[in-house]
Amino acid sequence: MSFLYYKDVIEEEDLVMAFISRNDIKPMIVKSGETLNTRYGVFPHDLMIGARYGEQIASAKGYGFIHLLQPTPELWTLSLPHRTQIVYTFDSSYVVQRLRVLPGSRVIEAGTGSGSFSHAFARTIHSNGRLFSYEFHKPRYEEAKGEFECHKLPNITLTHRDVCTDGFKVDGVNVDGDAVFLDLPAPWEAIEHLDEVVAKDRRVSICCFSPCIEQVVKTIEALTAKNWNGIEMVEVSGRKWEAHREMVRDVDEAVARLKDIKKRAVAGLERKRKLNQTSDEFENEDIDIQTTEENDISHKEPAGKGETDLKPKSDQNTKDRGYNPFGKGMRIREGDPAYNWINVTRSEPEVKSHTSYLTFAYRNQ
Amino acid sequence: MPGCNIIEEGKHVLVRLPSEAVKVVLLKGDSCISLGKFGTFSVSGVLGYKFGQSFEILENKLVKPVCSLIDDSKPLLLEDSNTFSENNQNLINTGSLVQKLSTQDIEELKKQGKGQDIINQIIAGHDSFGKKTQYSQEKYLKRKQEKFLRRFTIDYLGASEMLQYYRLKDPQRVLDMSNESLGLILSYANIRPGGNYILVDETGGVLLYAMLERMENEGSILVAHENEHPNLIALNYSNYSPELLEKMVSNLNWLQFLEADTQRPQWNNYPQEKIDRLTPPRRSHYLRKKRAADRVNNILDTVEQGNFDGLIYASTLYPPTLIPRILDTLGGSRPVVIYSPFKEILSETFHVLQKDYRILAPSIYETRVRQYQTIIGRIHPLMTTKGGGGYVLHATRVIPKEGGVTAVGRGIKSKRLKLDDPKVETRQPLE
């Protein structure tokens, strides 16, 4: 399996994405004799060779597991080593669609950065397209070059170059680009160099990706000066939602529970009074006793008194709490069939509320 | 892309008007196309140009190429500081009295043709134009250009354009899917040449068209549907040949799909001598029937074989009832991508999939594009935009370990004691 072709069984030297958890996906080249160490156990690569993509495998000890996934640009985006700020799937998927990037497209990308978007471009333009990617930072260029080779992406031509000063021409190749993506600090300096490398016989589209509005202003001015038209600027806001269940708590039941508490308080009072009478103690401590009783029901019980600690935990749920329609003080699993639930969604605790402004334009000359 | 570079005869194309309306038209060689108040042009005048070219309508249905739909290449107004105000202090709303030209006058002008002339005369006839600020003048001018400029752009009718056309016309027909949601679906479904996908498409074929664009004649799509025939009307406007569609797209209804054992056409070949003896009409009837039976049997064979490269689902059939029943036809580590205009539907689906060991890490995504006004000095988001756009659920089909496996996490010690019990938890706790 690779970023370009499907495959069913894992072989030696294959790139596999080990799905350890949602926030921990490890790309690795499978090599006989090596092992993957995770906090869920140790996984010898020999267990992976011959396994099917998608398979769940147990650790060497027999418990704890991971899933072995095929690499995709989207998984790579989640797992890659960050060298720069990267373009995420919400933005990249829209740019690819908007620029009409298709199999066979000739795409210009500057700079390469961490190579996140390069993988998405390479997948879509496929074997008969070509991605011309430029990176001016030497160590980043070297790392990206190694990655593209290791990931078997022969449709990428990577060049070490500052396009703002030296342009986009590649020796011995007619770039003939029909889609341009500029993720540079100063895209307006690169725009003037595009004339010599973009296609002449068909429409060319461009997207400039900049986080600041001041950059957008300069970009629009440069695009207008160079006869790009149909200028549009947008922002993509993406959100990931988690589905959860929220308990449906009926007010009538809350009232019924209050009644029950009151009834139990009165009963407790009775008991205490009888107790007091028999032990010949004072009689008028109503108020004090009442508040203590109420505290007992709503706050103290769940924490458990000395004796419950000695018993196994499960007893926590069987202890008599009187009428307890919402399972107060008990550990209730979300979706427990003994209760009523409503399906809800919640967005992630932290949202990427701004990535960059996307300035699109077209040219027909 | 061959075929999507040059405007050619016989193709369906998208026409964009200055009012931001879009039309789908067929370019028939010797015909004329009417754009309502924007005028009429003859098709021969636009052929041979590159897609994306804008035109202005001249007299006699002729056109001349222009650089853009709205004339923003030159400064909109004279740089004479006496012709605008610093603010709108002196601008008093006198309603229609402000314009010296009557509706009739304007209608007259429109008959005479040139859009720019009309706009110039309207401005000349506008009493308080000079009392507007420069910004407000530009805005006014742009509005008049949208109304009177007899310009249009011809765009290639790709899947995005088709989606835009339907969404403006009747959002329900494409399940209110936005272009950004479409892009997200295609990326998460990992659509590429050579894939074999199952598709459930209630967007009238727009989604199918978008997938075909990204597959470039390689691979296959099995369209599963709930009627006698699938509704793929959008393909009629695509520029794919029937032969190519025949090669790449097949379809099956849910009865055939889910109850393949009883729904297989029973077919007995006649011996050759019997076929030879048939009358020509009966023979062709026999052959047609045979082809139809073979077709369904072949498709059912591929379903039985399974190992599809992705499931793409955009349907109003309730996904929790359906997705689990077809998951086994997917290969390992292949995506399941479900689109719905409603987050609630996906949330229900999420809960069902989360319990299914054949599914890994379902997530619901929402993507919205916010467009900005791009006039320098006054950049801000547009004041109104289209609502809706839909939601996308993505998950991965995986192959659970036979007999289950104990997760590491809370209670691992007590679970380890019960290792003999194959029904122990096979999920790691979510982070």
Image (cartoon, grey):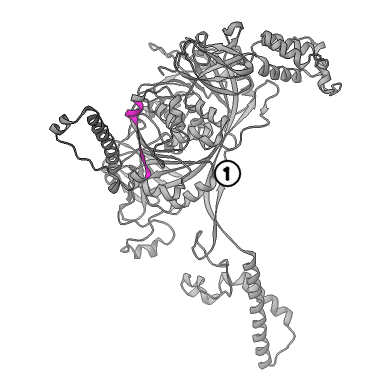
- Can you name the residue that lies furthest to the front here? B279
In the image shown, does B51 or A356 lie closer to the viewer?
Answer: B51
Q: Magenta segment: does it hold A275?
A: no
Q: Is residue A168 above or below residue B297?
A: above
| Residue type at the position of mark 1 | Glu
Q: Which residue is drawn at 38% across and 52% down?
A: B357
Residue segment shown in magenta = B244-254
| Chain hosting mark 1 | A
Q: Name the residue under label 1.
A: A350
The reply to whether residue B415 is in sight is yes
Q: In this view, does B165 lie to the left or right of A285?
A: left
Residue B360, image x and y in percent? 41, 47
Residue B178, image x and y in percent? 54, 33
Q: Quadrant of the N terminus of chain B?
A: top left
Q: Quick one: SS at disc 1?
A: loop
Q: Is residue A277 left or right of residue A109?
A: right
Q: Quadrant of residue A272?
A: bottom right
In the image shown, does B152 or A90 lie closer to the viewer?
Answer: B152
Residue A126, image x and y in percent? 37, 26
Q: Is residue A162 above or below residue A310?
A: above
In the image shown, does B36 or A362 lie closer to the viewer?
Answer: B36
Q: Residue at x 72, y 20 (%)?
A: B139
Q: Which residue is drawn at 39% across and 49% down?
A: B324
The reply to whether residue A120 is in sight is no
Q: Is residue B182 above or below residue B2?
A: below
Using a 10 Å C-alpha cutoff, classify the residue at mark 1 as few (fewer than 14 neighbours), some (14 to 19) or many (20 or more): few
Residue B27, image x and y in percent? 48, 15
Q: In which quarter of the image is residue B289?
A: top left
In the image shown, does B256 or A197 lie closer to the viewer?
Answer: B256
Q: Which residue is drawn at 54% across and 27% down?
A: B165
